[in-house]
């Protein structure tokens, strides 16, 4: 049996080492953490302590389409859900909440500013 690619044999005889000089795989779990993706809500500061609601233009959750990020709203999670529902119904669009950031589908910053000001919030357009 003269197979040059032999790696295992049931004959019990000596086995040739493979001739490939491929380096061994690096150990798993030592990768550095990835930076936040462009347009993700990871890089936004969500501190509601200053009392200013900021409207950022970013990427939506759905396929990288444009979206509006509402950051800095005070209140509980239930309050944020009520504000999100009101915004979605008024604008006729979709959206979601990621932690304390509301993500509205589409660029609606100019429409959201008077809407949130009518709810009693101080609003600023941020991020270009």
Image (tube, rainbow, N blue to C red):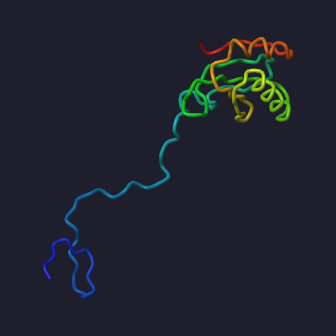
Q: Is residue 84 above or below residue 53?
A: below
Q: Looking at the figure, which quarter contains the N terminus?
A: bottom left
> For this rendering, which residue is in front, 99 or 93?
93
Q: Quadrant of residue 113?
A: top right
Q: Quadrant of residue 58?
A: top right
Q: Is residue 2 above or below residue 41?
A: below
In the image, 43: left or right of 115? left
Q: How many marks?
A: 0
Give the x, y percent position of residue 47.
75, 25
In the image, 104: left or right of 90? left
Q: Residue farthest to the bottom?
A: 11
Give the x, y percent position of residue 72.
76, 23
Q: Residue farthest to the front?
A: 92
Q: Is residue 99 above or below residue 65?
A: below
> For this rendering, which residue is in front, 108 or 101?
108
Name the residue rendered at 85%, 28% in the picture: 75
Name the residue rendered at 80%, 22% in the picture: 49
Name the residue rendered at 81%, 32% in the picture: 81
Q: Is residue 17 above or below residue 102?
A: below
Give the x, y percent position of residue 8.
27, 78
Q: Looking at the figure, which quarter contains the C terminus?
A: top right
Give the x, y percent position of residue 83.
81, 26
């Amino acid at each position: 049996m003269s197979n040059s690619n032999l790696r295992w044999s049931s004959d019990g005889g000596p086995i040739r080492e493979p001739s490939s000089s491929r380096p061994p795989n690096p150990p798993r779990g030592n990768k550095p953490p990835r930076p936040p993706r462009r347009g993700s809500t990871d890089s936004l500061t969500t501190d509601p302590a200053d009392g200013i609601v900021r409207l950022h233009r970013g990427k939506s959750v759905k396929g990288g389409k444009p979206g509006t990020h509402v950051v800095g709203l005070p209140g509980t999670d239930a309050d944020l859900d009520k504000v999100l529902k009101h915004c979605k119904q008024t604008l006729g669009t979709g959206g979601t909440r990621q932690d304390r950031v509301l993500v509205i589908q589409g660029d609606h910053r100019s429409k959201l500013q008077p809407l949130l000001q009518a709810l009693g919030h101080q609003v600023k357009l941020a991020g270009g």
